Amino acid sequence: MRRSLPTALVLLVGLVLLADFVVINPSLAALADGLLELVVLLAAAAAAAGGIALVAHHWRRLVARDDDATGSLVVLGGFGVMLVAGLYPGSAGASDPVVRWLVAAVLAPLVAAMFALLFVFVLRAGGRGLQLRPRQTALMLSSAAIVLILLLPIGGPLGAWLGSAAGWALEVPIAGVFRGLLIGVAVLAAVYAARVLLAVDGADD
């Protein structure tokens, strides 16, 4: 059961954090705070390792003169520019004016362009979905159209009514579905962790 120990640790940390949320106890709160700090450090280490792996991957592609070497060069160049802007002597990190300018002038337009391209791909996916699963896709597209209509920038009483309806839709049905998805994922994760700990699903492979 090579995967039992990490799963048990994750389950133990989750139970401690849940107990700290339910029970008011100074010792338990101190333990939960320490675990949270450890999780933050582990996440930072994982992010750093991911960044190093990304740089190494694109560097190998650049050295090997891969077909998409230009893309790798752009990725490495952007990575280096952001690192220099955030780590040069005297820099204020993420709140430095240079970093903020890069985010506002470069990163934000690129993200907006990516989301604009998503509209085209969603239309293509909707057409494909109507061919494969017409009922489910029609329901999804109808819901999306209703949300878009509610979020239209219209003034006057109609705009105010649409704004209130959009707020209700986001806070009640959409938030309910989202919470249901989170609960379902959490339950599935707990069941899978229990199966691994009990060696039910052949975790010895």
Image (cartoon, rainbow, N blue to C red):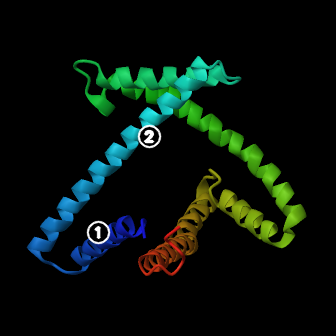
Left of 21 or right of it: where is 148? right
* Quarter the N terminus occupies: bottom left
Q: Position of residue 137 (x, y in %)?
A: 79, 66
Vertical order, 136 against 95 (above or below): below
Number of dots carrying numbers:
2
Q: Residue furthest right?
A: 131
Between 61 and 71, the one nearer to me in the picture? 61
Give the residue drawn at x 20%, y 66%.
Answer: 32
**Which label sits on residue 50?**
2
Give the residue drawn at x 64%, y 52%.
Answer: 154
Q: Quadrant of residue 11?
A: bottom left
Vertical order, 130 against 58 (above or below): below
Q: Amino acid at mark 1?
A: Val
Q: Secondary structure at mark 1?
A: helix
Q: Residue furthest front?
A: 205
Left of 97 or right of it: where is 21? left
Q: Position of residue 187 (x, y in %)?
A: 48, 78
Q: Position of residue 192 (x, y in %)?
A: 49, 75
Give the residue drawn at x 44%, y 40%.
Answer: 50
Vertical order, 108 against 18 (above or below): above
Q: Position of residue 174 (x, y in %)?
A: 57, 70
Q: Amino acid at mark 2?
A: Gly
Mark 1 lies on residue: 13
